[in-house]
Amino acid sequence: MNEIILDARNLVTEIHQRRGWLRVVDDVSFNVGRGEIVGLVGESGCGKSMTAFSLMQLFPTPAARVASGQIIFENRDLLKLAPNELRRVRGAQIAMIFQDPATFLDPLMTLGDQIAEPLRAHNFAGDVRARTRDLVEQMGLPDPDLIARRYPHQVSGGQKQRALIASAMSCAPKLLIADEPTTALDVTVQAQILDLMRDLRAQTGAAILLITHDLGVIAEMCDRVYVMYAGKIVEANTTRELFRAPRHPYTQGLLRSTVSLESATTELFAIPGTVPNLNELPRGCRFAPRCPIANAQCAHEPPFVADETRAVACWNVERAMASEIWKLDVGR
């Protein structure tokens, strides 16, 4: 494994509500190596985006907080930094591509000004205008000078996303957090954005934490994968091994749900049930109510996950891997 650049340890994030504090990220540990692309995958509502917001300590609501844990970035715990020290890290050393560029781009600023904003905020020593033009060209956008003068409503969704990536990469960060970077884009533009991210990794050596629910993107992009469910990591492995031999029933169900051109099946599969309400979590394994091989131990004892590269949170790993536990008629 490459040298670890980011190491999140026992991370707990909470949101305040009338009943008290609700854990949306619960004792999560993972790491990212220098120059590595690591995937964080799971269904909507499992805590992926809140994990990303926790790393940046930029939450969509003031009711959220990081309650405990460590976020070690280049041998410094980000949770212990003063606000002004953290601001020097954000945008310069760690940058984030948000899920919806239309939401995070300022409609009253030109794309050029928004790409240049991190450069000015971090006192870029060179020519800001020239650097901005270089970034626009690097993103593969046509007519850099014209694009830089346009406002977000004057460009396409794919061009908005490229502008957001250019802004994130402007200060050459060492870690790029990409939260569903291809959502709402057509498949052609998706492929272009993923190619662009791979090129940026190759050119700059930046590590990437890629957050998505799309297993196809994970397979194409990532070196390692963490699978998240109901606020917890349930499996971690290299991408090759995870797809070759998934060990957690949830991971197996996710892979079973994908559609492949090589598959001869005429029916679609979906994991029965839904992600549990975080206010009403099962006592034991959080996936137990949806799992076809759950037993009494699963219902009453939370499975333990060792903090290692090949981790799995399941009491019945051998049984899960011994046979096909998911059938097309499950839940009917």
Image (cartoon, grey):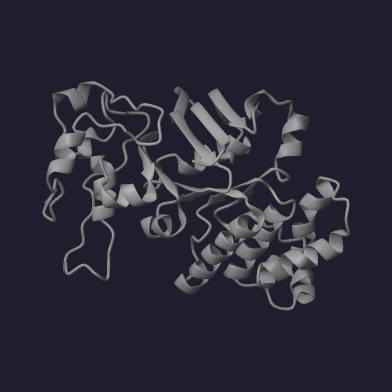
Q: Residue at x 54, y 32 (%)?
A: 7
Q: Position of residue 196 (x, y in %)?
A: 58, 65
User: Of 308 and 25, which appears nearest the observer?
Assistant: 308
Q: How many marks?
A: 0
In which quarter of the view is residue 198 placed? bottom right
User: Of 282 and 115, which appears nearest the observer?
Assistant: 115
Locate residue 115 relative to residue 303 in the image: left or right.
right
Q: Residue at x 38, y 50 (%)?
A: 239
Note whether residue 15 is visible. Answer: no
Above or below residue 309? Residue 157 is: below
Locate residue 70 relative to residue 165 in the image: left or right.
left
Note whether residue 65 is visible. Answer: yes
Q: Position of residue 4 (x, y in %)?
A: 56, 36
Q: Residue at x 82, y 46 (%)?
A: 121
Q: Residue furthest bottom?
A: 143
Above or below residue 64? Residue 118 is: below
In which quarter of the view is residue 157 placed? bottom right
Q: Position of residue 180 (x, y in %)?
A: 50, 54
Q: Residue at x 40, y 41 (%)?
A: 46
Q: Position of residue 101 (x, y in %)?
A: 61, 59
Locate residue 180 relative to residue 41 in the image: left or right.
right
